[in-house]
Image (cartoon, rainbow, N blue to C red):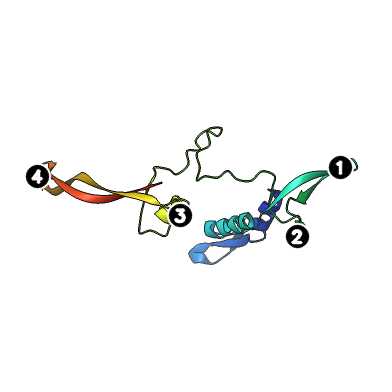
C-alpha cells in the first residue's frame, strides 16, 4: 500500500491562489493537491492489472515473497502483489458470505458492459423469457396537486444467467 500511495504522490500538483486588492497577488498561497480522481483510479487499476501472485519462502531466518509462477519476473518494490487469488464471482461459494454467483441474475442482452449477458453470465449463456410488465403511463398533472396515471401492460424480454 505504501508504494501504491507513493505512485499517486508522484502525480501531486501544486495549486496556488493570489490574495490582494483586485487580484494584485500581494500574497500568494500555494499547496500540494491530489491528482484528479480519474488519474488516481487509473493508477490503481494499472497496478491491479499488473499484480503478481506470490508465496512466502523462508530463506535463512527471513521470509521472502517469490512469484508463484516461475515464468513471471520477480516483482519490484513498486509492484502490487497478492498471496491469495480473488474468488470466482461467477460461482456460488457457500463458504463465503455474499458470494452468490451470477446464476439467475438479470442481464442486458445488448450491452457490452458489466451488465451485459456475455460478461455477467461468465460465458454460460442465458435464458430468455417473455414477461408482462405493468407500468404507469399517460400521466397527467391535475391542478392542484396530484398526478393521475393509467396502467399500461406490455410484453418485454427478460434475460437471466444460466
Q: Of callouts 4 and 2, which one flags the residue occurring earlier in the amino acid sequence? A: 2
Closer mark to the observer between disc 4 and disc 1: 1
Q: Secondary structure at mark 3?
A: helix
Task: Name the residue rendered at 50%, 42% in the picture.
Answer: 91
Closer mark to the observer between disc 4 and disc 2: 2
Q: Secondary structure at mark 1?
A: strand
Task: Name the residue rendered at 56%, 65% in the picture.
Answer: 25
Residues at circles 2 and 1 in contact by the CB criterion of under 8 Å: no
Residue, disc 4:
142
**Seen from this angle, which residue lies furthest bottom?**
24
Could you say which is closer to the camera, residue 135 or residue 8?
Answer: 135
Mark 3 burial class by Cα count in 10 Å: few <14, some 14-19, many 20+: some
Tell whether 155 sits left or right of 74: left
Residue, disc 1:
62
Closer mark to the observer between disc 3 and disc 4: 3
Closer mark to the observer between disc 1 and disc 3: 3
Tell whether 87 sits left or right of 69: left
Residue, disc 3:
119
Q: Of callouts 2 and 1, which one flags the residue occurring earlier in the amino acid sequence? A: 1
Q: CA distance from mark 1 to mark 3?
A: 43 Å
Using the rendered image of the protein, determine whether residue 116 is visible from the camera's viewpoint: no
Q: Of callouts 2 and 3, which one flags the residue occurring earlier in the amino acid sequence? A: 2
* 23 over 4 or under it: above or below: below
Q: CA distance from mark 4 to mark 2?
A: 70 Å
Q: CA distance from mark 3 to mark 4?
A: 45 Å
Residue, disc 2:
73
Number of marks in the image?
4
Amino acid at each position: 500500500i505504501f508504494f501504491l500511495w507513493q505512485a499517486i504522490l508522484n502525480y501531486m500538483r501544486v495549486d496556488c491562489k493570489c490574495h490582494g486588492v483586485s487580484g494584485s497577488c500581494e500574497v500568494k498561497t500555494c499547496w500540494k493537491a491530489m491528482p484528479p480522481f480519474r488519474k488516481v483510479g487509473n493508477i490503481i487499476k494499472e497496478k491491479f492489472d499488473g499484480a503478481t501472485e506470490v508465496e512466502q519462502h523462508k530463506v535463512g531466518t527471513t521470509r521472502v515473497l517469490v512469484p508463484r509462477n516461475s515464468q513471471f519476473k520477480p516483482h519490484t518494490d513498486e509492484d502490487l502483489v497478492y498471496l491469495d487469488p480473488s474468488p470466482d464471482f461467477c460461482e456460488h461459494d457457500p463458504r463465503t458470505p455474499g458470494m452468490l454467483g451470477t446464476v439467475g441474475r438479470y442481464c442486458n442482452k445488448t450491452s457490452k458492459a458489466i451488465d451485459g449477458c456475455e460478461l455477467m453470465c461468465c460465458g454460460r449463456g442465458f435464458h430468455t423469457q417473455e414477461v408482462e410488465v405493468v407500468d404507469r403511463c399517460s400521466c397527467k398533472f391535475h391542478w392542484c396537486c396530484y398526478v393521475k396515471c393509467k396502467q399500461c401492460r406490455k410484453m418485454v424480454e427478460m434475460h437471466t444467467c444460466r
